[in-house]
Amino acid sequence: MTQTTERLDALRAKMAETETDLVVLAPGAHLAWLLDVRPHADERPCLAFVSASGAGLLMPALEAESARNQTDLPFFQWSDDQGPEAALGDLLGKLDAKDADALVLDETMRADHAALVTDALPGARRRFTADTIGALRMRKGGDEYAALKRNAQIADRAMQAAWAAMRPGMSETQVAEIVRESFAGAGARPLFTIVGAGSNGAYPHHHTGETVLKTGDAVVMDIGAASEGYSSDITRMALIGDGPQGYAEVHDVVNRAVEAALAAALPGVKAHVVDDAARGVIAEAGYGEYFVHRTGHGLGTEVHEPPFITASSQTVLDEGMVFSIEPGIYLPGRFGIRLEEIVILREDGPEILSDLPRTAERLND
């Protein structure tokens, strides 16, 4: 049985469980995960339909030849001079879905493409993918874990390569380039390289620029890349010399927040409990107002995907879920500290994918 067949079977089982008649996916992460199909996305509707009895793709004629190399599912082709409506009607008929009542739409779909589908199914009740394909993607299998672990090791080495080269007088962009070169050398595609030196570290999503590293700086380093269809994401701290005044105390608070979140992350626990644990440590230490984002996000084929570890999330955590734990404290005008682990949830708690310690890497000044 192929991976695509297994995933289609799993989706249909979820559809039966949730009383879903039809799932419609646009080009993007859901479709790539389910069918390993990555058609070109533009204004022409190119959509995958899955029902209890079959599956097919509404396919622009311009894309058909190249897309045929990716799948043997039936195509319902349409050309620019015809428009997609007739092909869509034919597809719905072949899938016995013209009277679909419960419809799931890909939440990333273009609004006009979604309207095309809903206009063709005026009686259908629409919802999004959280309890069908979204629920499946949150729980990673063994092959997915192995790919994510390899990605984490590639990111570890990229971080270490940057540390080995960093010195006062280098710019943030020069440090980022070392990271990107390390990723590329390992066959991974760089996705982001946040390097925030000194007071720039107080901006959680600082745009890496030409700021020059100097003695006494704390440097936030948040990096990630893609390989084998999966992503990495890790944040660590580097110090040029001794770092800024008060650094050690704040680093300890953030690290204890990570530890508290790790201890709280268990199967059956709601995601907000993990956020509560991290936030509680930081608030108790007097830095609550400086923790300005959620504790974590899921990771897989996308860098940010469910589950989201927020103060309001009611998602129940389960074995196989992969997500970040990344509390931070950001002191305007001074420095910021974020420590990020990617974990996979096991029966007895989280397994950390990175092998790097969370201690700050102290560099020569």
Image (cartoon, helix red, strand yellow):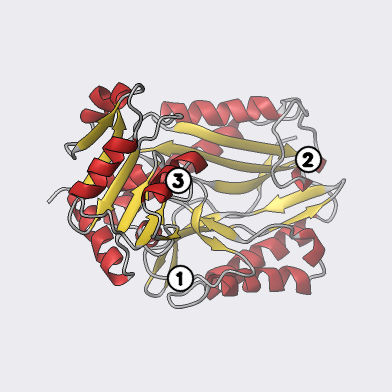
Q: What's the CA distance linking mark 2 and mark 3?
A: 41 Å
Q: Which residue is mark 1?
A: 317
Q: Callout 1: few (<14), some (14-19), or many (20+) C-alpha neighbours within 10 Å? A: many
Which numbered disc, 2 or 3, marks the residue that appears first in the sequence? 3
Q: Is residue 355 left or right of residue 255?
A: left
Q: Which residue is mark 2?
A: 200
Q: Please state which amino acid type lies under the numbered disc 2.
A: Asn
Residue under the point 60% across and 48% down = 235
Q: Position of residue 255 (x, y in %)?
A: 65, 62
Q: Is residue 316 above or below residue 27?
A: below
> Is residue 147 visible to the viewer in this orientation of the structure?
no
What residue does disc 3 label?
114
Disc 1 to disc 2, C-alpha distance: 34 Å
The answer to whether 186 appears left or right of 254 in the picture is left
Tell me how far mark 1 sits from mark 3, CA to CA. 30 Å
Instruction: State whether residue 355 appears in this view.
Output: yes
Q: Residue at x 85, y 52 (%)?
A: 245
Label 2: which secondary element: helix
> 321 or 111, which is in the foreground?
111
